[in-house]
Amino acid sequence: MGKIVAFSNQKGGVGKTTTCVNMAAYLAAKGYKVLIVDLDPQGNATTGLGFAKSEVKSSVYNTMIDDMPLAQAVLTTETENLDILPSNIDLAGAEVELVYVKDREHVLKRVLEGAKNSYDFIAIDCPPSLGLLTINALAAADTAMIPIQSEYYAMEGLSQLMNTIRLVKKHLNPSLELEGVVLTMKDNRAIISRQISDEIRKYFGKRVYDTVIPRNIRLAEAPSHGKPIMEHDNKCTGAKAYLALTEEFLSKQPKHKK
């Protein structure tokens, strides 16, 4: 049975999609069968893997709203072992349409039920909000991974996200756990960056990953080439950091050792 991990943070621009895509790519490179679910209407994971949103005919929207079989919407990426359930502009209306669906918080869970037998890991890239799409992701997930920027504003809203996770665990998904917290876009030259990192480590303790993702130009430009960082420049500091993060993640997954 595959493990479902929701990459979530309601603040945008914290490296959520970058973390989701690159960890998924490195897991695939290590021989695991991986599915990325692009649940963000902005579709950055979709374009970041080389697919134009305007050309995506079937998406996660169709599987959730039109009951389309998952296999009909999944796309094979150029990275071996890595598939994506893409997003397109239709997903923007899903929040409203889901309001009228019975048991609306569990729609994505039903969509992914069968896929757990086909994949080792399913990585959900959540939208930067705490609306119904994110609730669906957390209700379907086994764990939540929180990428967080080492900046003051990133701390704001963190308690709101943790409260949402607690509520989902209490009312919708009792088995939901916190996978961990990843510090992203770290600038070691900035004193405030170090102070915020210390605060986050104090708050979350051992749940904060040792691996820290630095600010890196090559990492930032990889999505515009439609490639994960390991295929764009596997020697850069960003690539090395995501490889280390993936290995640290795997070291915490006894069932998934290959």
Image (cartoon, rainbow, N blue to C red):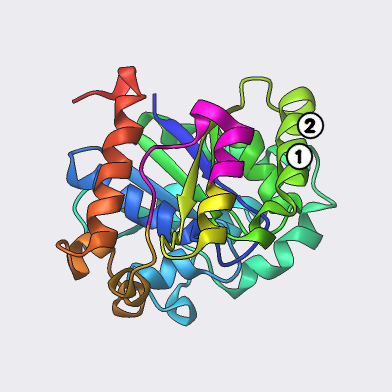
At 71% from the left and 38% from the top, the residue drawn is 162
At 44% from the left and 58% from the top, the residue drawn is 73
Q: Position of residue 206 (x, y in %)?
A: 49, 27
User: Which amino acid is tagged 2?
Assistant: Leu
**Image position of 48 with respect to 180: above or below:** below
Q: Position of residue 200 (x, y in %)?
A: 59, 42
Labelled disc at residue 164:
1
Closer to the camera, 182 or 109? 182
Please, what secondary structure does the residue beneath circle 2 have? helix
Asked if disc 2 and disc 1 are in contact, CB closer than 8 Å, the reply is yes
Q: Position of residue 184 (x, y in %)?
A: 46, 55
Q: Quadrant of the N terminus?
A: top left
Q: Quadrant of the C terminus?
A: top left
Rate crowding at label 2 as few (under 14), some (14 to 19) or many (20 or more) other CA atoms within 10 Å. some
Based on the picture, tell me whether residue 204 belongs to the magenta stretch. yes
Q: Position of residue 26 (x, y in %)?
A: 25, 48
Left or right: residue 240 versus residue 193 is: left
Question: Is residue 161 shown to the viewer in this render?
Answer: yes
Rate crowding at label 1 as few (under 14), some (14 to 19) or many (20 or more) other CA atoms within 10 Å. some
At 64% from the left and 34% from the top, the residue drawn is 203
Quadrant in which residue 6 is drawn: top right
**Image position of 255 with respect to 216: above or below:** above
Left or right: residue 126 versus residue 69 is: right
At 36% from the left and 73% from the top, the residue drawn is 223
Q: Which residues are magenta?
A: 198-213
Closer to the camera, 8 or 190? 190
- Farthest residue to the front: give it: 191
User: Which amino acid is tagged 1?
Assistant: Thr
Question: Which residue lies under the disc numbered 2?
Answer: 167
Labelled disc at residue 150:
none
Question: Is residue 128 shown to the viewer in this render?
Answer: no
Magenta segment, principal secondary structure?
Answer: helix
